[in-house]
Image (cartoon, rainbow, N blue to C red):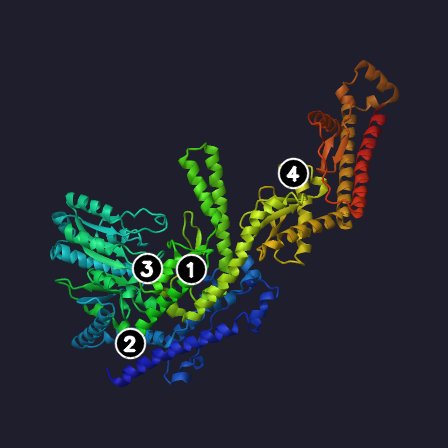
Amino acid sequence: MSSVEMSSTVQQVESIIQTIESKIEGSSQQHSPASNSSSAKSEDSGLDDGAKKVSVAKPISRKSSRMSQSSGVSLPPVLEQLEHMIISDDWLGNEVSTPPASVASGKSHSQLAKTRSREGQRLSELGRTLVTSASLKSYIDLLSSHHRQSIAAWLYGNVNHAFSNLFRFSDSQVYCSDAEATISLSIRNGIGHAVKLALKKTYGSDYNTKGWRSFVEQGAPVVYVSPALHMDVSSYLASEFGIADVTILPKIESDLSEIEGRIDHVKFEKILDEDIAAGKKPLILLGVVGSTILGQNDMISKILEIRQNKAQFWLHITGQAIAALAFREPNNVLVHVLSQVDSMTFPIALWLGIPSAPVVTLHKSVEGYKASYREKLDTLPWWVATSYLTGKKIVDMIENAYLLSKIMLKGLSGIPQIEIVGVENPVDFANRVYKSKYTAPTVLIFKYNYENIKNAVQHHKNLIEKNEDHQAIVNAEKALQEELEYGDYLNAWLRDGMLVESQSLGVDTIELGGNYGIAFRFCPLEHAATFSSHIDHVQRFIRRLSDIIKIVESTVDARAKFGELKDEFPSLVLLPIRNWAGIGAVCYIPSIVKETNPDDWNDIQKQQISHLNLELVHQIRSVDAAFSSGECTKYGVACVKFGMLSDVKDLVNLVQMVAQKGKEIENSQQYLDSLAELIRQGIEAANQHLKRENDLRLQNEGMIRQLPIMGSLVNWWSPLTPESQNIRGRAFNLKTGEMQETDVLFKKSRDSTAASDTPQVPHEVTTTPENAETVESVTPTENEVSEQTENATDGTNEEKN
């Protein structure tokens, strides 16, 4: 290959990458939500995106390509077509699924969704170089055998030397995993390479020639897996190597073991003895140093002692804490222990924010193993990366991530309301980290410390230990679940409030499970290089968290006092509501429904209550937008939800405002008009009932009984029964909104009078003249309904007589 051909090839690859990125960037700016383009404005145009025809990709003209303009290199039509396919997804045509109606109606414009999907696709200079160099691997394959073997060996030697020195892992060889869809799969490939080396070392040349028969002759291999390795390797090892015995080792029992556990080396030693006694052969142990959730380490030193005393097996480690080996002054104990393992796999590309670079595995030399040409050539991206960054810059980026973790730990320890999961005394631990007695954690899991959860957990545990009755335990468990749910929503509200500050640090939320729920996860090794995070970002995050945590504290205190105010405001009823991080919810009960128990509310009453409370929310939101409407699923009525509260002292004023506004609405002319309409409908319904019953009576008696002379004769000959002669009257109950028969109504009245000496006193919110006048205007209306109903009944009886 001539230098001119090589230069032309590299120039073509670089030019197409630059062209694609520039077009993507231009398209993103054109369809940005902040743009003034027609596409952005069409979101509120009222047109249904789903009804639009999908545009068909037009043939691309070579003249339209910017390639020739930017580089002067002619681009083949097939590459121009590929360029268009990468830049736009219009060519997918009808294969693109139609968005839901809610999305098409304006919640998420289809073009805006395309723009957001392109975020993060613009490569850095190093990323472009890696993509370009990776494409040259195929070009190198075209060289003569000796030439390409020499290039691959030279690349392999340089990368192997760089990583061996960087991670202080002498006498080692490097292996680059094949690129996979996720980093987890790439790490699994690195583990597979370690298993292959362990098989070669344990079974020798027999494994290459006899395969699984060597397992029968020498003993079946057993793979031991740390419980902190969140990866399914059983099916992978079975399909790739025919290994069936994969043992997930027991955890050390602790409060955090339900989240993530470490290897219990005592139980592992017993399992190892049992496998050896059964004729099995321990092959490899997969340990974790710096787990993904809690950043915990398996006790590698204990495992090394067991290996020395019991059986020789391959020890492979993975995890975030391996990065600490690259410090300028690493911990001597850490270097001494980890240098004795046989292999290690780590996603250094993630730590350095480098795309298109494979996961690296370092391993000790194995007799009979020699890296292939393809394995050597796969190190090309890392040769480019290490040459571009240099060892000094790599160390700076790793140490910067640990520095951010140290500063975040110090800031979180200064907020007493924040719980750092796995750290008993955050202040003392942070001080020891700053004095370099401990290494800064690779992962920080923290959350709002909602004390009610711990109290509920302890109460539930005490009832179980005391063997209390089943119902008490059930109630305690229900209360615990409610507190856990509320704690999750508090942390979810914190997440939304910290969204802007979290993006620059890569802070996200995870579900821990058990009694821990939702928490924040900060892992600077994974995000610091990608987002260019620095100290100012952490300090801004801590300041924002300190401010917003005060609101959460005030809300929790107000929620505890919320129930105590119900006696001061009898018109308000506290209702249970879910999926809400605010203080709680109340429902204003109008006076006409006050006497009815909430469990006995009928549909009409629920409709009245919901209508009033929705109007109440509409009016008070103009004063305070923190109020919102909700629905109590237990009673099926609308309610007023109180949001977060910045000062607990304002709680009484807020509740008082809701009560007063509710009474104003109840006494307003609009509400009285709606109540009058309800009464009118009830009277009409009562008349319809009476008319239908009278028609039915006439139909049953027949026409002869209605004649003046013949009716008397027929009645004397065949008299009617008392039941058929008596027509039950109808009464419209204003309080329940239901139609009732008068005899049933009177019977209930007599029974209630006999059952209780003290009648139920109707609620009166206040005794102001205005309210007194309102009550008088309602009372005659209720009497009028009874009077008209009785008149309707009497009229029917007179007609019968």
Q: Looking at the image, is mark 3 or mark 1 nearer the viewer?
A: 1
- For label 2, the crowd category at 10 Å Cα-Cα, with few meaning under 14, some 14 to 19 and many 20 or more, is few
Q: Residue 157 at what x, y percent from top left?
A: 19, 73
- Can you identify the residue that label 1 sits on? 413
Q: Does 751 sit left or right of 131 as displayed?
A: right
Task: Tell me how far mark 4 sits from mark 3, CA to CA.
Answer: 55 Å
Q: Secondary structure at mark 1?
A: helix
| Residue 390: mark in rendering | 2
Task: Tell me how far mark 3 sits from mark 1, CA to CA.
Answer: 32 Å
Task: Tell me how far mark 1 sits from mark 4, CA to CA.
Answer: 50 Å
**Residue 791, can we see it?**
yes
Amino acid carrying mark 4 in the image = Trp
Amino acid carrying mark 1 in the image = Ser
- For label 1, the crowd category at 10 Å Cα-Cα, with few meaning under 14, some 14 to 19 and many 20 or more, is many
Amino acid carrying mark 2 in the image = Thr
Q: Are marks 1 and 4 in contact (CB under 8 Å)?
A: no
Q: Secondary structure at mark 3?
A: helix
Quadrant into which the C terminus falls: top right
Q: Residue 736 at what x, y percent from top left?
A: 70, 37
**Which label's residue is closer to the chain start, 3 or 2?**
3
Q: Residue furthest right?
A: 709
- Can you identify the residue that label 4 sits on? 601
Q: Looking at the image, is mark 3 or mark 2 nearer the viewer?
A: 2
Q: Residue 217 at what x, y percent from top left?
A: 11, 48
Q: Secondary structure at mark 2?
A: helix
Task: Tell me how far mark 2 sits from mark 4, CA to CA.
Answer: 75 Å
- Can you identify the residue that label 3 sits on? 184
In the rendered image, which quarter is residue 119 located in?
bottom left
